[in-house]
Amino acid sequence: VTKAIAPSKIILSGEHFVVEGEPALVAAIDIYAKCIAEERFDESIRIESKDYFGKIHVIKYSKNKIIDYAGDKNTKRILRPVLISVLKTLEYSEQKKGLDIYINSEIPPSAGLGSSAAVAVATSAAVIGEIKGNINKEIIWKAAFEAERAVHKNPSGIDVTISTFGGLILYKKGEKPNFIKLDYKPIFIVGLIGKRAKTGKLVEKVLKLKKEFPSIINPLYISAGNLTIKLVEALKNKDLKTAGLLMNINHRLLSAIGVSTPKLDMIVNTAIKKGAYGAKLTGAGGGGSIIALVDESKLEKVKSSLEKKIKKVYVSSIVEEGVKIV
Ligand code: PMV
């Protein structure tokens, strides 16, 4: 039996813009997807998943077919990417094995925190750990990326990359991750706003706008790319005032491309008013989550004011490790 855990993520700047090649800055945080894999005596794959709300979903895959399932009408849709992650991991490791897979995720789904990617990454790691005895991050990345593609057609790969490798990454689509080292731990508040549209839908909406008004929208992409580079500099220099200001500007760029909502704007403004260095929506938007960069002295004040307005508030910093066997 092998157990793996993979971290979720917050995007500090550049979501959406990253899909079209601009750099984005992303950090792993300590909310995890967990997966246990155990070899079976036959060649079937059984996947059992307990979601964030405690609901159990089950599918069994045998002879190229999903032959039975328990849960609800969404079970197949929810577990199909997990199955892809398992099958691709077996294919890339050149193994044919039956497996029992148990998933337990602490990460709220559709919240902009990369839950689907973290589940796919943890699954691939547990499978490869179980059949080979150690993990191979290249295979994990490739298998989880295929799973992500089943969820939304045009992923930048940012979620899979951060969940696999951890830390703080300056990410550009199609390039090797550029790890950024900080000699201190910035504090982030993550606020869960609520349910939202699927990432794929939001990505499509933005790309459509870009296609319709290139002369207006393209400069925003360049602006966001420049902003990400400046944000890396500010964080490296521990200039958190500038970093916060840049996050605020990033939020407005995301608002300009149509992925903010009145509630996201309201919560971002509350965080700033209560003393955060800066705040923005994180992930695909349209609901989901916000992040705020705060000083320790302001942490309680910002946190308690957000708790009055939204469901769930986390405090986190960057976790250095990506997926691992535990
Ligand atoms: O799925 P989310 O909400 O974690 O967002 C992913 C980030 C996007 O830039 C919106 C999409 C992508 O593939 O990069």
Image (cartoon, rainbow, N blue to C red):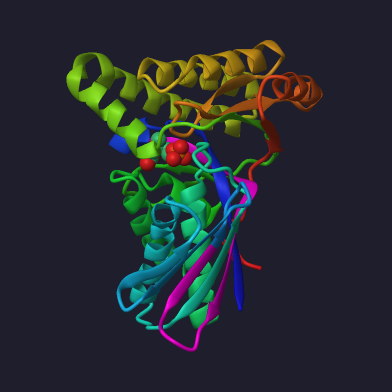
Quadrant of the displayed image that contains ligand 1: top left
Is 39 colored magenta in this rendering?
yes
Q: Quadrant of the N terminus?
A: bottom right
Can you give x and y, in whole percent of width and height, for residue 140 in the image? 44, 64
Give the percent coordinates (x, y) of residue 305. Answer: 74, 18
Look at the image and tell me whether residue 167 can be seen. no
In the rendered view, tell whether residue 7 sits above or below residue 206.
below
Position in image of residue 263 (x %, y %): 54, 17
Can residue 259 be spotted in the picture?
A: yes
- Residue 255 higher or lower than 133, as above or below: above
The image shows residue 181 at horizontal and vertical percentages of 59, 44
Residue 215 is one of the magenta-drawn residues? no
| Image quarter of residue 243 | top right
Q: Is residue 157 above or below residue 140?
A: above
Picture residue at 73% right of the left edge, 20% below the top: 308
* Residue nearest the viewer, comparing 305 with 41: 41
From which residue to which does the magenta span run? 22-48
Q: How many marks?
A: 0
Q: Nearer the viewer, residue 92 or 226?
A: 92
**Front in this rendered view, residue 116 or 271:** 116
On screen, residue 55 versus residue 200, left or right, reads right
The dominant secondary structure in magenta is strand
